[in-house]
Image (cartoon, coloured by chain):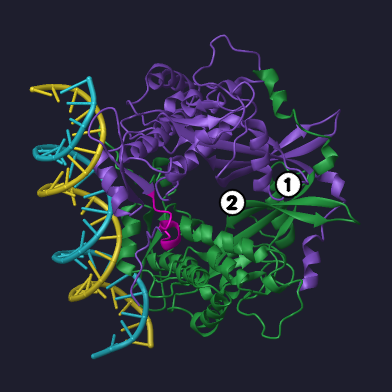
Chain colours: A green, B purple, C yellow, D cyan
Amino acid sequence: MQDQTAATRKGRPPAKAHDAHVDLIAVVVAVTDQEPSVLTVGQANALPSGPFELGHRSLQSGLRAWVEQQTGHQLGYIEQLYTFADRDRIGEQRQQRVISISYLALTRAEHAAGPSKRAWRSWYDFFPWEDHRSGAPPVIADTLLPRLLAWVDERDHDPLKRERWQRAAIAFGFDGRDWNEELVLQRYELLYEAALVEEATRGSEPNKSLPISGISMIADHRRILATGIARLRSKIKYRPVVFELMPPAFTFLQLQRTVEALSGRLVHKPNFRRLIEQQELVEETGETTADTVGRPAKLFRFRHAVLDERVVAGTKLPLSRA
Amino acid sequence: MQDQTAATRKGRPPAKAHDAHVDLIAVVVAVTDQEPSVLTVGQANALPSGPFELGHRSLQSGLRAWVEQQTGHQLGYIEQLYTFADRDRIGEQRQQRVISISYLALTRAEHAAGPSKRAWRSWYDFFPWEDHRSGAPPVIADTLLPRLLAWVDERDHDPLKRERWQRAAIAFGFDGRDWNEELVLQRYELLYEAALVEEATRGSEPNKSLPISGISMIADHRRILATGIARLRSKIKYRPVVFELMPPAFTFLQLQRTVEALSGRLVHKPNFRRLIEQQELVEETGETTADTVGRPAKLFRFRHAVLDERVVAGTKLPLSRA
DNA sequence: TCAAAAGTGTTATCCTTACACCCATGT
DNA sequence: ACATGGGTGTAAGGATAACACTTTTGA
C-alpha cells in the first residue's frame, strides 16, 4: 500500500502553474460589558489576517501568530469556519488564486497584551439589525423593510416577486414569522443582493440614494464575520463553548447576559438556570459576589470534566431496541 | 473605503515565497442496496481528488470537474468538510505546502456515466466497526477491545491509564455506555493512536503482530472519509439531506433503510414514519409499489418546498417573551 | 394459512415553556 | 419600604419512546 501514496500526486502538473496564495483570517470574539465584540485591525474595518507561511507549523499556529502580531492577543479556542477562493490579479495580466481560510476564535478581552484594547468593536456595529435584545431594532422596520419591498418590486412577474418576498420574510421574520437569530449569513447575503450594504455597490459609482445600515469592512470580511456569528449562535446551543468567553468564576446572570449578547435575544432566567444546572455544566466555587445591588449571587465555574465525560450527542432518530 | 482593500495585502511578501499547492478531495456518497457507498479511484483505496486550477471557476466547480473526469460521475449536493495543510517535499530540499480542501457530496449511484460502476465501495469496508445494524460487530469485542486494553496498559501510571480507557470507552461504548454513531472520527483517531490501523504504521517497518481491521487508504484519505461520514451522520438529524440519496419516488421503508445504512443503526419503524410525516417532509405520489412481498406500500416524494418554507432552526435556549 | 411488510392507536415519560412566587441585600 | 437581582415550585403542553395491534398482499 505504501507505494500507492504516489498515486495521489499522479495528475499534478508543474507546481508553479497554479499554486495559490493562502490567507488566514480570524474572527476573534469576546464578550465585554454584555457586548459581543470582535477583534479588528486597521481602521476597525478589517479582520486580523495574514498569509500562511512555510515557517508556520500548522494552519492554526499560523493564525495564532498573525493575530498575536497584529493585535497582541493570544488565542485560546479556535475552530475552522470556511475556505473560499478568489481570483486575484498580480502584476500585469498574470492571475493568481487566493485561498482564504477563515477561523472562529473565542477569548476574553482581558487576555490582550499590547496595542489591542481599542481594536475591539461590538459586532452589532456591523450588523445593527441583529440585536433583538430590546425587541426588533427600529432599523428593520424603518429602513430595511421598505427597501426590501422596493427590491421585491424590481421583479416583473408575480412568482418572482413572491420568491424574493418569501426569502426576505423568512430571513427577517416578516409576515408574523418568528425571528431566527441563526440566519445571520442569509440576512447579510440578502441585503447584499438587494444592494443595501456598502460592499455590494463597490466598483459602481456611488448611488445618491445611499445604502445604509451597518459599518462595512474591507473585501469580504463582513461576510466572514457574519459566518462566524452564525456559527457561534448555532454552536452555543449544543456545545458548551460560551464558557470560553467567561472569566474563571461567574454568576448565572453573567453567563446568561453573555448568551444573550451572542444570540441577540433575551432568555428566560429561571429556565436558563435549570438548563445549565441539569446538564451539570457548572459547579459552585463556594464564593458569592459582592455585587452593588440585589442579593449576592453564588459564583460558579465551568466543569471542565464534562468535556471528557460526555459527548452531548444529539439523537433525533427513533432508534429501535436490540 | 474602497482604497483600503489594499490594506489586506499589506504584509504579503513576494508571491512565490510560500505559495501553496491546493488539492480538492471529495467524499462522494450514495446508498445502493442498503449499503452506504463511497466513490473511490485507483485500487479502490483513494478518494477522487485533483489540484485546484486556474481554469476552475470556483472550488466547487473544480471539484466537480475532477470527480467527473476521474469517475464519470456528476455531483449534486456538495458541502465543504474541512481544510488542512501538510508539508510536502518536492524535488531536493525545497519544501512546499499542500492545502487540501475536502468536500462531502451526495448522489445516487445510478447517476454514473462511464467507467465508474465498480468504483463504489461500502464505507463499512473501511470502517467495519461502524456498522451496528445487526448489533455491535464482532470485530469490536474480538479484536479492538483486547488491543485497546493493551494500549491502555502501555501507560505506567494509573491516571494515564484511566484517561486512555475513558476515551476508548466513550468512543466505543464500553463499560455499559451507549454507542454513539457520530463519533466516527474520534474512533478512527483513537485506533490510529493505538496503531490499530495500517496508516499509523507507515514509515516504520511492518510489525509482526499486524494491525488490522478495515481497508486502509492512501495518505490521509481514510481520515477524510471518517470526517465525511461523521458529518453526514450528524446532519441527517437536523437537515433533510437524506433525500439527496433517494430516487424521485420511494417508500417509507426504503427511506428508513437508507437512514439506517448511513447511521449504522436500526430505527423504529412506526416512530420513524411519524417523525417524517409530522415534519411534512414528504407527500404521496399516488402510486404504490409492486413489491414482491408484503403489502404494497405507498410511494412518496420529497417536498422540495420545505427547503424554502422552513428553516428547521433548532432553538435550545429558553427564550423569554417580550 | 402464513410470512412479510404496511400502517394505526395508545400510553408513559421526559423535556420545554410559562407562570407564580419567595429570598436576600442595599438604599 | 422597595427596588434589584437571586433562586425555587409547579403545572400545562408537546415531543419521544415503547408496546400492541390491525391491514394487505404474495406464496
Residue B315: image x %, image y %?
38, 60
State the extent of the magenta-drawn residues as a range: B302-312
Q: Amino acid at mark 1?
A: His
Q: Is residue B52 above or below residue B177?
A: below
Q: In the rendered structure, the residue with mark 2 lies on which chain?
A: A
Q: Residue sitting at 51 percent across and 34 percent down? A: B110
Q: Which residue is tagged 2?
A: A78
Numbered badge on residue B38: none
Q: Is residue A181 above or below residue D15?
A: below
Q: Quadrant of residue B1?
A: bottom right
Towards the viewer: A76 or A103 = A103
Towards the viewer: A188 or A228 = A188
Residue B39: image x %, image y %?
56, 31
Numbered badge on residue B56: 1
- Which residue is the extreme one toward the top? B208
Q: Amino acid at mark 2?
A: Ile
Q: Is residue B18 magenta?
A: no
Q: Point out the image quarter for the C terminus of chain B.
A: bottom left
User: Along the horizontal axis of the image, is B298 left or right of B92?
Assistant: left
Residue B84 seen anywhere in this rendered image of the structure:
no
From mark 2 to mark 1, how far is it between C-alphas?
30 Å
Residue A215: image x %, image y %?
65, 75
Q: Quadrant of residue B53?
A: top right
